[in-house]
Image (cartoon, rainbow, N blue to C red):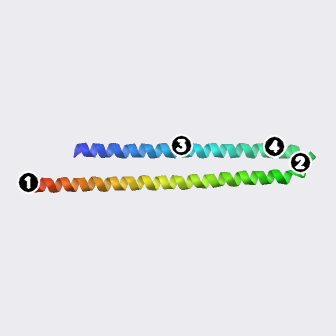
Amino acid sequence: TQAMEVAHMRAAEELEHLYERKLAAEAARYEALKQHKDDMQSAFEEKMLQLQEHHAGQLERYREEMAVARREAERVHGQLREEKEQLKESYEEELTQEDRDYEDEITKLRRKHATALA
């Protein structure tokens, strides 16, 4: 059973490692999108100040473009948050199932040994 425990621990660690890698990838993706959004917002605000004197009519159009970009970034952020929660739930379900499988195996082995000893 020690070998099984070691195998179980390795499997749990591997799942945890995969989960952490996925979370890190999603966090990096989110940060890249956030940086992109921040860069777009900074560029927009600078351009708005330059154009305000010469093109007052274009100001509303730029505001709308920024709002669309912000809504898209917020939508993506919401999706990432949902994906993170789904990954967490999936990971926890996998661990729970592994625990059940492990306990079932232990029970079978105990019964087998009890029968053999009887």
- Which numbered disc flags the more N-terminal residue, 4 or 3? 3
Of tags 4 and 1, the one toward the viewer is 1
Residue type indicated by callout 2: Gln
Q: Residue 113, how many percent across, how many down?
A: 13, 53
Give the spatial CA distance, label 3 vs label 1: 52 Å
Secondary structure under badge 4?
helix
Secondary structure under badge 2?
helix
- Which numbered disc flags the more N-terminal residue, 3 or 1? 3
Residue that numbered label 4 is attached to: 46
In the picture shown, does residue 64 fall above or below 49?
Answer: below
**Which residue is found at the position 76% from the left and 51% from the top?**
66
- Residue 52 badge: 2
- Which numbered disc flags the more N-terminal residue, 4 or 1? 4
Residue type indicated by callout 1: Leu
Q: Quadrant of residue 107?
A: bottom left
- Residue 25 badge: 3
